[in-house]
Image (cartoon, rainbow, N blue to C red):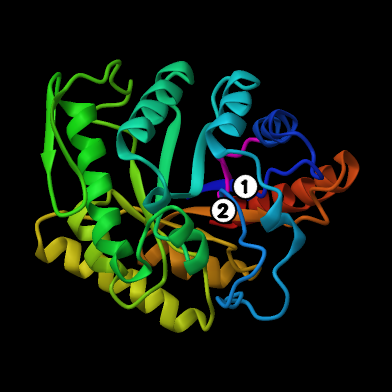
């Protein structure tokens, strides 16, 4: 199993490049950043975790800018989005950004994508929340066409363009892995339709979550896909439970660095060191 770290890159946290160096120095495989282009000042959509929306949601740097600084400050660690709200982005310009970052990082980009949950945020981008999952599929498919063809065309319900050249292509072939985020009842359909892997938040009870990972593997085998990589965010502390996730098909566990721990260098280092020791114990025991 690989291990990663994710966080909200804000103006009130340690710099993305600094975090990436700390994470790489400790042997983690990957580092991820979140995305919200903005938070509507007035909204009816409730925070899924309940209570007030945490302050960091309002202050996030652009993920591709943040990831570029991370890639330039490191040598081997993979950099990714957790997740990119592609339903709020133009697919052509996003395909360009992804390809550029992948090439400039030496082929280290992981493209986590999702549809988001703040309905007012989507609407400000012209996206109907009721259509966001169909839109997400088309924009992923359009990006793939751009990355894998010298001249690309796409004609769908929402995305339409004919014969464009958008080079350079990503360094990874055929393109960076597309990790589909979300925990909804139909997320497996989206993973199987256009994803290279599943990237959910771990939401207990663990027995049910593990069963969902196993179900995705079964469907992948039945569809001729073979094993489907699963990355979980916020892994369990109990090594025995993490071992069950790994046996079910989880290939990456991503620790979330909370805002309080990301507020300064010393607190971030303490948390990363704690995770490093826990991971070392898990790997040794395995």
Secondary element under disc 1, as helix, strand or loop, is strand
Secondary element under disc 2, as helix, strand or loop, is strand
Part of the protein shown in magenta: 27-35
Which of the 4 quarters of the picture holds residue 223?
bottom left
What's the residue at 21%, 46% (across, down)?
159
- Across and down, in percent, residue 37 comes to 56, 48
Find the distance from the CA under tag 1 to the CA under tag 2. 5 Å
**Mark 1 nearby-residue class (10 Å; few <14, some 14–19, many ≥20):** many
- Is 259 covered by the magenta stretch? no
Camera-side residue: 29 or 173?
173
- Across and down, in percent, residue 68 comes to 56, 25
Residue 14 visible in the picture: yes
Which of the 4 quarters of the picture holds residue 185?
bottom left
Camera-side residue: 16 or 235?
16
Residue 121 is left or right of residue 259, and the answer is left
Vertical order, 117 against 9 (above or below): below
Residue 204 is left or right of residue 18, and the answer is left
Residue 118 visible in the picture: no
Number of the label disc, if any, that sits on residue 5: 1
Residue 119 is left or right of residue 158, and the answer is right
- Across and down, in percent, residue 257 comes to 71, 53
Vertical order, 129 against 6 (above or below): below
Residue 243 is left or right of residue 189, and the answer is right
| Circle 2 residue | 254
- Is 32 covered by the magenta stretch? yes
Vertical order, 58 against 219 (above or below): above
- Across and down, in percent, residue 282 comes to 61, 56
Which of the 4 quarters of the picture holds residue 130?
bottom left
What's the residue at 83%, 56% (across, down)?
260
What's the residue at 66%, 46% (across, down)?
60
């Amino acid at each position: 199993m690989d291990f990663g770290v994710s966080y909200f890159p804000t103006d009130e946290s340690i710099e993305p490049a600094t975090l990436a160096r700390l994470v790489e120095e400790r042997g983690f495989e990957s580092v991820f950043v979140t995305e919200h282009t903005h938070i509507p000042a007035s909204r009816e959509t409730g925070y899924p975790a309940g209570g007030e929306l945490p302050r960091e949601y309002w202050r996030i740097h652009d993920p591709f800018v943040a990831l570029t600084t991370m890639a330039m400050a490191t040598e081997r660690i993979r950099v990714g989005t957790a997740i990119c709200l592609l339903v709020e982005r133009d697919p052509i310009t996003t395909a360009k950004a992804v390809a550029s970052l992948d090439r400039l990082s030496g082929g280290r980009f992981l493209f986590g994508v999702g549809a988001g949950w703040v309905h007012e945020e989507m609407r400000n981008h012209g996206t109907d929340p009721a259509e966001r999952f169909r839109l997400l599929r088309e924009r992923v498919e359009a990006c793939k066409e751009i990355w894998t063809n010298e001249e690309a065309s796409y004609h769908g319900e929402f995305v339409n363009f004919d014969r464009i050249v958008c080079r350079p292509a990503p360094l990874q072939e055929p393109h960076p892995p597309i990790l589909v985020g979300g925990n909804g009842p139909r997320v497996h359909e989206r993973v199987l339709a256009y994803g290279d892997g599943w990237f959910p938040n771990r939401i207990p009870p663990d027995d049910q979550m593990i069963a969902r990972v196993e179900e995705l593997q079964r469907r992948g085998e039945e569809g001729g896909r073979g094993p489907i990589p699963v990355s979980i965010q916020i892994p369990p502390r109990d090594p025995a439970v993490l071992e069950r996730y790994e046996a079910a098909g989880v290939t990456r566990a991503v620790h979330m660095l909370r805002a309080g721990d990301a507020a300064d260098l010393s607190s971030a280092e303490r948390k990363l060191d704690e995770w490093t020791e826990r991971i070392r114990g898990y790997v040794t025991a395995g």
